[in-house]
Amino acid sequence: MIITQKKPIEELMAMLEGATKIALLGCGSCATACATGGEKELKEMTAYLESHGKKVVATAMSDYCCMNMSTKTCMKKLAAAQPDAVVCMSCGDGVQVAAKHIGVPVYPSNNTMFLGESVRLGLFEEACHLCGNCVLGTTGGICPISRCAKSLVNGPCGGQKNGKCEVNPENDCAWIMIYHKLEELGQLEKLTQTRPDKGYADVSYPRTINIRGKK
Amino acid sequence: MRLLENALESGKFGVTVEMAPPKGYDFSEQMEAAELLKGKVHGVNVTDMQSACLKATSLGLCIKLKQAGLEPIIQMTGRDRSRMAIMGEMFSAAAFGIDTMLALTGDHPVVGDCSQSKPVYDLDSVGILNMLSTMEATGMDCGGNEIPGGAPKFYKGAVVTPVYEPQILQINKLRQKVDAGAQYIQTQGIFDLESMKRFMDAVDKANIKTHIMAGIIPLKAAGMAKYMNENVPGIAVPQDMIDKLAAAAAEGKEKGVKGLPTKLGIEMAAELIAKIKDEGICDGVHIMAIGAEKNVPAILEKAGLSI
């Protein structure tokens, strides 16, 4: 899922300067799991804004802020309350979808951090860089693109110490993890496979995928 | 000139020394050290912002050294350059007669002194070697376009860390580097012969054919050795060396003589080099004096080494 983190509230309040009537849009998927844009956070945000001179004129929860169909309906409801601005409490994609469907500014309450996993409640780890050409089949299901600070695909650099990464000693060296996993799977021969250079031509952004056959 | 290639490929004991460009544009200290090294080494290997600390580029000092009559080896990391930038830099190097290179992935900017810099890592060390080997074989650039006048050819090297657990990962990467076109290999600094011998055995067992040059770091003080043991990956200075350096410092303090640990460091480095050569442990040495390049002639003399 997309991992988000709340922006410092002062940053949001600066964006809202001059706006009095505020509408809030929460997200029922990733941001709910990250505790940055679920029902609870929506209530907290309402209370905060109301106690700081703003009037929350409407709130809505989109099942997925990133899905046009779901969010468009929510934005119609919010627009009806004629807000000066909307605060979208989702990831950066949700903010952009919301902004398409209303004529007033939509401001983000979160920073969008990474694509990752919820390891346990409140602990999130980055796990995928959306590189567009997955190598997990040869690396024991551990992603060197996102788990290695240098995104090395041909094995480790010389920079690990006691299995920890030189860039951040809190992190395990991805390639040592991959080695142990392949050993466990009886697939150590995969270590010796040279991974052809993927290049970057196919990941020029913004990317579009169309499986409809038409626009 | 290809001094290093000629030496290693004809079975001679290769000797290179590492040199870092300055932070800034005053190259005088480097050029003074270079004068002392002239005719004594097969190459001066110029670092590419080692430890991710901002310096003048490797190419700049390489050009200066070449103009002064030395044999520069250009280091090229993937940290700050895309494949286009690397290839362009290598064209420029070739235009100045620089014909030997060393490919590295490069330390991450976060560990350096300009930590906000964006890391590139378009290619890692293996990727850089592959790209240059393909360029040489096909005469095409990294986009598959013909290079007018043909591709420059380099004697290409890479690095390896002998003291590493699990060692198979280093051996495996070494094989990939050699397969990608590395013709010589420099090791991380080694301090005891036994670990170097164990590493060389592992290379032999893996049937990897290349020229390996042992990395030699002359120690200057017990504190330096301890610091490296704690902070530099792949460095393992034996305790008895640290004790000897500490004893030399104590002796110097007692007698009021300065520089005894440095002198001892020079002797220990020379002894290690002489043993490596005499016992035929590997094909050469790469001396990393870390700013004390002026001491290198003394080390070579004590080791009885001339090129």
Image: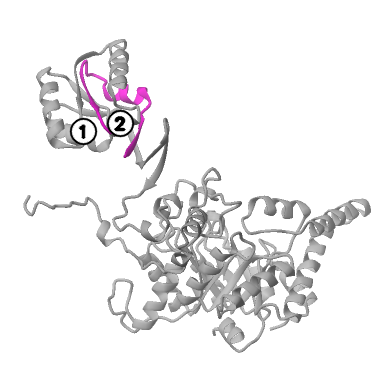
Residue B29 counted in the magenta span: no
Instruction: Check disc 1 and report its element: helix, strand or loop.
Output: loop
Image vertical order of residue A90 relative to residue B254, above or below: above
- Cβ atoms under marks 1 and 2 closer than 8 Å: yes
Image vertical order of residue B131 relative to residue A49, above or below: below
Check disc 2: other Cα within 10 Å, few if <14, some if 14-19, many if 20+: many
Position of residue B104 measured from the top left corner of the image (x, y, whole percent):
50, 65
Q: Which residues are magenta?
A: A1-29
> In front here: B240 or B141?
B240
Q: Chain of mark 1?
A: A
Q: Residue at x 37, y 56 (%)?
A: A136
Q: Is residue B163 left or right of residue A21?
A: right
Q: Residue at x 63, y 87 (%)?
A: B11
Task: Name the residue beneath numbered marker 2.
Answer: A31
Q: CA distance from mark 1 to mark 2?
A: 9 Å
Check disc 1: other Cα within 10 Å, few if <14, some if 14-19, many if 20+: many
Q: Is residue B8 left or right of residue B271?
A: left
Residue A25 counted in the magenta span: yes
Instruction: Check disc 2 and report its element: helix, strand or loop.
Output: helix
Total numbered labels placed on residues in the image: 2
Residue A200 visible somewhere in the drawing: yes
Q: Chain of mark 2?
A: A
> In front here: B172 or A80?
B172
Position of residue A78 measured from the top left corner of the image (x, y, whole percent):
14, 22
Q: Residue at x 80, y 60 (%)?
A: B241
Q: In the rendered image, which quarter is residue B264 located in?
A: bottom right
Image vertical order of residue A46 relative to residue B101, above or below: above
- The extreme left residue here reads A214
Q: Of the numbered discs in the image, which one, if any, rests on residue A65?
A: 1
